[in-house]
Image (spheres, helix red, strand yellow):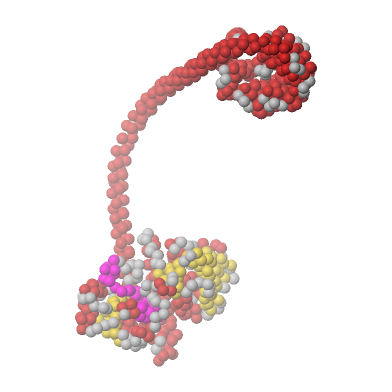
C-alpha cells in the first residue's frame, strides 16, 4: 500500500499557490479579463479533481488538457505543475507507463526550473510512485530519498510521512527486507499527523508486520487487531484485508486454529467482496483506458487540425503578400526590360564594332608573333651554323700543337663564340617562355659529374681572365647517373657560374652539389653557387631577377641582363625557385633545390652509354652531308683527328648517290640543304633498307624538332655546336647499337 501524490499535493501546494495569487494581487490590480480566466480555470479544475477521486480518469485527462492550454497561455507555472501531477497519476491508474513517466519527468524538470522546494518534493513523490507501479523498485527508492532532505529542511511533516512510509512499504513488500524498513517506519510514525487516520492505520499495519517478522506473535496479534479496527473506521479496505491475513497467521503460529478458522471466514467474505470490487474496478479502468485513448487521439487530431488551419491561413496570407510583391516586381521588371532592350541594341552595335577591331588586332598580333617566332628560329639556325664553324675551328686550332704560340688568341676566339652561342640560346629560351608555348622537360639519364666538368671547361677562359679559382664539390652520396633535363640544368648553372665569375676578381667561386634526401628513385639535390665577390645589396637583390636588370661593376664582362631571368623561369618550370643570400663586401650564395630521378646503370641512357670506347671509331667510314663548306671542314677535321675515314657531300641527293656507290658505317646528315634536304634524303635511304646508322647533325634544337624528324627515322640527333667528347660518344653508341 502506497500513498500517492494527489492525496497530499493539494495540501502541500495550497500554501504556495495561494502565495502566488496573493503576490499577484498585491503587486498589481487584476483586470476583469484575468479574473474571468482564473474563475474559468478553477471551475474546470474542480470538476477534474472530483472526477479524479471518483476514478473517472478519462474525464480527468480531457479536462486537464483543456486547463493546460489556458495556464500555459497565462503563464501560471505552478498551476501547470499541479495539472500535470493529476495527469501523471491518472495515466498511472490506467497502466499507461509511457504517459505517466512523461508528465512526471516534465514536472520534475519544471520544479527545478522554478526552484520551488514543495514542487520538487511533489515531483519526486510522483516519479517514485510511478517507477514502483511499473516494477522499478530501486529507481523508486532513489527518487523518494532525493526528496527526503528537502522535506526535512522544509519541515514538511506530511511529505516526510509519505516518503518514509513508501520507502518502508517497498522494503517490506518488494525487497523482503523488514530490517531495512524499520528506521523508515519509525520516521513515518514520528511525522504522521494526529488527525491523519489513514496514515496512522498504515503505520499500525507496518508495525504489525515488523512484530510478526520478529516472531513476537502476541504483540503482532494485538497490533493486527488494532489495525483491523482502524481500517474499519476509515473504510481502508486494502489495509483491512492485510490486517485479517496477518492476524490469522499470528493465530496459526499460536496454534489457536479454531479462532483462526472463525476469523478466516470473515476474511474470506471480505476477500470475495474485494474481488468483486476489483473486477468492477478493472472493468472500469479498462473502459476508462479505451476512452482515454480515444480522447488522446481526438486531442492529437484536434491539435493537428488547428495547426493545419493556422498553416493554411499563414500560407494564404503569404500567398497574397507574395502575389502583390510579384505583381509590383513584374511591373518594375517590365519597365526595366524596355530600357535594357533599348540600351542593348545600342551596346550590341558598339560591341560588333569593338569585336571586329579586336579580331583584326588579334589576327595582327598572332601574325606578328608567328613572324617573330619564325624570324628567331631562322636567325638561331643562321647564327648557330657560323658559330659551329667558329667554335669547331677554334677547337681544332687550339688542339694544333704547332699553334701553341697563339693559344691565348684562340681561347679568346672560342670564348667569344661560346658567349655568343649562350646569348642566342638565352634569347630563344626567353622568347619561348614569353610566347606561353609549353616548355617540355626531358627525363634522360646523364652523368652529373661529366655535365659539371663540361660546364667548368666552358668557363675556363672567363675564369682565367678574372683570376678566380673555380671549384666543384660533388656529394659522394649522389649516384653517378641521374635522370633529368640536362640541357636546362646546364643553362641554369652556366648563367649562375658565369655571373659569379663576372662579379668576382681574384677570388673563389664554388659549385656545391649536395644530396638532401632520397625517396625511392627520386633524389632531392641542392645546388649552391658561392662566391666571395663584391656581394649584392638588399635593394639590388630584387632588380637582378628582372629582364635586362643589371648591376654596375668594374669588371670586363657586363652581360645581357637576361641570365637570372631565364634561371628563375626555368626553375619555375622545373618546380623549383632560385634563392639568394648575399652580404655586400663578403660575397653571394645563389642556391636552389631540385628533384631528379636516379637512373639504373643498365638503363642509364638511350643515347649515351656509360663505358663506350671512342677507339671503336677508328677506321670507320663516315659520310658527312652538309651544304656549308666551313661546317664540312670542321666536322671532317674533328673526325679525321680520331682516325675516322671521312667522305663529304653537299646536299641530300649527292649523299644518296654516294651511299649507292660506297658502303658507309655511319652518315651525319644536315637538315636544311638545297636540292634535297636531310629529312627527305633520310626517308629515301630508309626505303633502301640498308643497315646504316644515320644521325641528324643540325642547328635545330631538340625542342624545335617536329614530327618530320621522327618520320624520317633518324637514329639520333646532334645539335650544333657540340662538345667533341659527347659528339664522339654519341657516334660510338649508335654504331654499337647497329652491331
Q: Is residue 384 visible?
A: no
In the rendered image, residue 609, in percent from the top left (x then y), is placed at 39, 76
In the rendered image, residue 424, in percent from the top left (x then y), is placed at 38, 71
Residue extending farthest bottom? 402
Residue 601 highlighted magenta (yes or no): no
Residue appearing at x 31%, y 85% in the figure:
620
Residue appearing at x 39%, y 80% in the figure:
612
Above or below, 237 relative to 392: above
Residue appearing at x 60%, y 13% in the figure:
275
Q: How many marks?
A: 0
Residue appearing at x 36%, y 61% in the figure:
437
In the rendered image, residue 593, in percent from the top left (x then y), is placed at 50, 65
In the rendered image, residue 338, in percent from the top left (x then y), is placed at 32, 32
Above or below, 127 relative to 70: below
Specify start and end residues of the magenta stretch as a single range: 707-733
In what quadrant of the picture does the N terminus appear? Answer: top right
Pick whichever, 643 or 241, lies toward us: 241
Pick whichever, 148 or 38, lies toward us: 148
* Quadrant of res 422: bottom left
* Quadrant of res 59: top right
Pick whichever, 103 or 586, lies toward us: 103
* Quadrant of res 569: bottom left
Q: Is residue 701 visible?
A: yes
Pick whichever, 319 or 155, lies toward us: 155
Left of 285 or right of it: where is 667? left
Left of 276 or right of it: where is 143? right
Above or below, 90 relative to 406: above
In what quadrant of the picture does the C terminus appear? Answer: bottom left
Amino acid at each position: 500500500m502506497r500513498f500517492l501524490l494527489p492525496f497530499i499535493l493539494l495540501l502541500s501546494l495550497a500554501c504556495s499557490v495561494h502565495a502566488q495569487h496573493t503576490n499577484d494581487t498585491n503587486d498589481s490590480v487584476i483586470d476583469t479579463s484575468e479574473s474571468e480566466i482564473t474563475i474559468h480555470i478553477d471551475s474546470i479544475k474542480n470538476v477534474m479533481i472530483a472526477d479524479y477521486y471518483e476514478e473517472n480518469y478519462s474525464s480527468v485527462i480531457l479536462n486537464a488538457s483543456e486547463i493546460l492550454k489556458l495556464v500555459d497561455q497565462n503563464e501560471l507555472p505552478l498551476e501547470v505543475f499541479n495539472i500535470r501531477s493529476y495527469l501523471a497519476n491518472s495515466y498511472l491508474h490506467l497502466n499507461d507507463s509511457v504517459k505517466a513517466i512523461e508528465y512526471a519527468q516534465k514536472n520534475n524538470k519544471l520544479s527545478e526550473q522554478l526552484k520551488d522546494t514543495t514542487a520538487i518534493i511533489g515531483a519526486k513523490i510522483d516519479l517514485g510512485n510511478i517507477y514502483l507501479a511499473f516494477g522499478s523498485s530501486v529507481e523508486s527508492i532513489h527518487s523518494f530519498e532525493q526528496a527526503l532532505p528537502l522535506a526535512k529542511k522544509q519541515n514538511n511533516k506530511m511529505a516526510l510521512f509519505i516518503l518514509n512510509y513508501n520507502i518502508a512499504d517497498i522494503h517490506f513488500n518488494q525487497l523482503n527486507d523488514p530490517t531495512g524498513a524499520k528506521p523508515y517506519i519509525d520516521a513515518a510514525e514520528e511525522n504522521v499527523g494526529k488527525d491523519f487516520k489513514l496514515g496512522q492505520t498504515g503505520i499500525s499495519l507496518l508495525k504489525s508486520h515488523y512484530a510478526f517478522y520478529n516472531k513476537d506473535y502476541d504483540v503482532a496479534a494485538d497490533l493486527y487487531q488494532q489495525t483491523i479496527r482502524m481500517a474499519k473506521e476509515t473504510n481502508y479496505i486494502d489495509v483491512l484485508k492485510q490486517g485479517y491475513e496477518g492476524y490469522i497467521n499470528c493465530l496459526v503460529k499460536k496454534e489457536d486454529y479454531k479462532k483462526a478458522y472463525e476469523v478466516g471466514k470473515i476474511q474470506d467474505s471480505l476477500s470475495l467482496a474485494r474481488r468483486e470490487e476489483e473486477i468492477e474496478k478493472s472493468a472500469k479502468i479498462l473502459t476508462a483506458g479505451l476512452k482515454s485513448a480515444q480522447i488522446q487521439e481526438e486531442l492529437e487530431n484536434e491539435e493537428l487540425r488547428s495547426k493545419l488551419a493556422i498553416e493554411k491561413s499563414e500560407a494564404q496570407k503569404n500567398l497574397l503578400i507574395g502575389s502583390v510583391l510579384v505583381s509590383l516586381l513584374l511591373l518594375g521588371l517590365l519597365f526595366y526590360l524596355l530600357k535594357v532592350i533599348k540600351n542593348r541594341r545600342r551596346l550590341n552595335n558598339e560591341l560588333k564594332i569593338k569585336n571586329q577591331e579586336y579580331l583584326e588586332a588579334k589576327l595582327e598580333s598572332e601574325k606578328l608573333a608567328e613572324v617573330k617566332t619564325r624570324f628567331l628560329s631562322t636567325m638561331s639556325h643562321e647564327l648557330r651554323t657560323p658559330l659551329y664553324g667558329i667554335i669547331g675551328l677554334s677547337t681544332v686550332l687550339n688542339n694544333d700543337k704547332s699553334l701553341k704560340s697563339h693559344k691565348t688568341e684562340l681561347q679568346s676566339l672560342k670564348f667569344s663564340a661560346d658567349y655568343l652561342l649562350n646569348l642566342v640560346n638565352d634569347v630563344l629560351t626567353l622568347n619561348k617562355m614569353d610566347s606561353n608555348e609549353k616548355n617540355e622537360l626531358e627525363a634522360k639519364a646523364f652523368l652529373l659529374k661529366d655535365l659539371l666538368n663540361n660546364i667548368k671547361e666552358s668557363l675556363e677562359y672567363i675564369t682565367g681572365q678574372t683570376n678566380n679559382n673555380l671549384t666543384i664539390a660533388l656529394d659522394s652520396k649522389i649516384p653517378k647517373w641521374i635522370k633529368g633535363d640536362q640541357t636546362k640544368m646546364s643553362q641554369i648553372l652556366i648563367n649562375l657560374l658565369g655571373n659569379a665569375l663576372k662579379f668576382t676578381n681574384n677570388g673563389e667561386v664554388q659549385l656545391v652539389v649536395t644530396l638532401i634526401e632520397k625517396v625511392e628513385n627520386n633524389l632531392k639535390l641542392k645546388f649552391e653557387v658561392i662566391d666571395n665577390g663584391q656581394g649584392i645589396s638588399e635593394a639590388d637583390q630584387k632588380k637582378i631577377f628582372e629582364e635586362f636588370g643589371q648591376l654596375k661593376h668594374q669588371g670586363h664582362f657586363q652581360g645581357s641582363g637576361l641570365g637570372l631571368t631565364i634561371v628563375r623561369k626555368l626553375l619555375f618550370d622545373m618546380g623549383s625557385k632560385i634563392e639568394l643570400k648575399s652580404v655586400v663586401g663578403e660575397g653571394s650564395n645563389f642556391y636552389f633545390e631540385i628533384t631528379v630521378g636516379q637512373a639504373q646503370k643498365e638503363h642509364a641512357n638511350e643515347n649515351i652509354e656509360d663505358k663506350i670506347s671512342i677507339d671503336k671509331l677508328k677506321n670507320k667510314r663516315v659520310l658527312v652531308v652538309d651544304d656549308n663548306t666551313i661546317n664540312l671542314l670542321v666536322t671532317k677535321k674533328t673526325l679525321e683527328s680520331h682516325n675516322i675515314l671521312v667522305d663529304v657531300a653537299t646536299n641530300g641527293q649527292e649523299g644518296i648517290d654516294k651511299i649507292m656507290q660506297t658502303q658507309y658505317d655511319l652518315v651525319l646528315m644536315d637538315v636544311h640543304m638545297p636540292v634535297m634536304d636531310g629529312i627527305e634524303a633520310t626517308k629515301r635511304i630508309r626505303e633502301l633498307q640498308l643497315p646504316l646508322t644515320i644521325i641528324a647533325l643540325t642547328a635545330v634544337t631538340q625542342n624545335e624538332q617536329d614530327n618530320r624528324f621522327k618520320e624520317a627515322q633518324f637514329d639520333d640527333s646532334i645539335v650544333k655546336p657540340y662538345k667533341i667528347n659527347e659528339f664522339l660518344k654519341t657516334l660510338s653508341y649508335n654504331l654499337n647499337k647497329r652491331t
